[in-house]
């Protein structure tokens, strides 16, 4: 009897608190779960604004849900997100180990997104505006063995501007990649970043291109033989001799890279330049260069009045 009375009083308190919050619009600013789990399903809608915090130290399962974050800290230890829409602005998103996100439309503006180890994302539609992504030891987007895999990022920073459309395969390892505004990279292109790649604004990169700031393997034949003997890429012991040489790549603004071109480590392409079909580009090229051939050479200066 006493327990039932206390339970009823509790429900009345929760109801009055909800009504007061609805009238004043002063919703709780912090939600924290210590262990256990939270499940949201069937067309839920979660809105957090104005210095709010959601922190879950257990499991967070969200399905068929719209999540709107503004000036918010969203911190989840183990996240499972399916069939969702996320819109975040001026927020910090921290996603813990072994998270899984599938069939999600994410739009981020002025946000920092930190992904911990072994995070997997598939069938995503991501739009980033002036946002920063950092990954843990392994981040897989669209499936490790999927021929349509888009991103594989390991212990790297990926900084993107506005209106970035990447249909390519992207591998970043212990590196930094900086993309400006208005970039389009078409299907079949592969970008490997193990040092630093900077791409300026308004850049077109066509089909089946290669952009590599690394040799990918050592030039020492003995080191390469050891990698093969050890069953590359699994359980390969890395030594100073076996590490490939790397050098940063810089692609200026308003650059067009034609189909099946290759841009190799240490290359700098000046603003307003064009790289021709199937060219192999290495070295430093000034602005307004028309680059073609193997090895790529300046054919003419294409500066317009």
Image: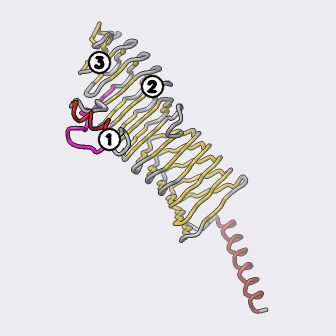
Give 293 or 202, whichever is nearer the viewer. 293
Q: Nearer the viewer, mark 2 or mark 1?
A: 1
Residue lying at 53% horizontally and 38% vertically, measured from the top left: 127
In the rendered image of this protein, does residue 291 appear above or below residue 143? above
Instruction: Residue under label 1, please give it.
Output: 230
Range of residues picked out in magenta: 236-251
Residue at horizontal 38%, vertical 13%?
278
Cβ atoms at labels 2 and 1 below 8 Å apart: no
Per the picture, the main secondary structure of the magenta-coloured stretch is loop
Helix or strand or loop: what does disc 3 sit on? loop
Cβ atoms under marks 3 and 2 closer than 8 Å: no
Task: Identify the residue under disc 3.
Answer: 287
Which labelled disc corresponds to residue 210?
none
Residue 297 image point, x, y percent: 27, 11
Q: Which mark is nearer the camera, 3 or 1?
A: 1
Give percent across and percent down for residue 82.
Answer: 63, 49
Q: Give the mark, 3 or 1, whose residue is nearer the N terminus.
A: 1
Q: Secondary structure at mark 2?
A: loop
Q: CA distance from mark 3 to mark 1?
A: 45 Å
Crowding at label 2, few (<14), some or many (≥20) Cα neighbours within 10 Å? many
Residue 246 shows in the view: no
Q: Nearer the viewer, residue 185 or 238?
A: 238
- How many C-alpha atoms fall within 10 Å of the one at disc 1: few (<14), some, or many (≥20)? few
Q: Residue furthest top?
A: 300
């Amino acid at each position: 009897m006493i327990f039932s009375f206390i339970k009823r009083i509790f429900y009345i308190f929760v109801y009055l608190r909800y009504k007061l919050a609805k009238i004043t619009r002063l919703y709780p600013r912090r939600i924290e779960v210590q262990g256990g789990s939270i499940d949201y399903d069937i067309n839920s809608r979660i809105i957090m604004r104005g210095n709010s915090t959601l922190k879950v130290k257990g499991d967070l399962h969200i399905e068929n849900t719209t999540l709107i974050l503004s000036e918010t800290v969203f911190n989840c230890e183990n996240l499972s997100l399916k069939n969702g829409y996320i819109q975040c602005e001026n927020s910090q998103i921290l996603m813990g180990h072994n998270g899984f996100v599938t069939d999600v439309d994410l739009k981020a503006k002025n946000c920092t997104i930190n992904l911990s180890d072994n995070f997997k994302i598939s069938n995503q539609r991501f739009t980033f505006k002036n946002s920063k992504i950092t990954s843990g030891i392994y981040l897989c987007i669209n499936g490790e063995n999927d021929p349509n895999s888009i991103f594989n990022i390991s212990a790297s920073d990926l900084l993107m501007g506005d209106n970035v459309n990447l249909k390519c395969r992207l591998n970043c390892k212990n590196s930094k990649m900086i993309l400006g505004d208005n970039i389009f990279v078409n299907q079949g292109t592969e970008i490997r970043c193990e040092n630093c790649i900077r791409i300026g604004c308004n850049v077109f990169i066509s089909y089946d291109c290669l952009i590599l700031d690394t040799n990918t393997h050592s030039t020492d034949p003995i080191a390469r033989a050891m990698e093969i003997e050890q069953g590359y890429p699994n359980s390969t012991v890395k030594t100073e001799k076996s590490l490939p040489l790397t050098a940063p790549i810089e692609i200026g603004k308003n650059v067009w890279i034609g189909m099946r071109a290759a841009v190799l480590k240490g290359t700098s392409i000046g603003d307003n330049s064009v790289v021709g079909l199937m060219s192999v580009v290495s070295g430093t090229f000034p602005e307004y260069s028309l680059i073609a051939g193997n090895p790529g050479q300046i054919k003419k200066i294409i500066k317009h009045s």
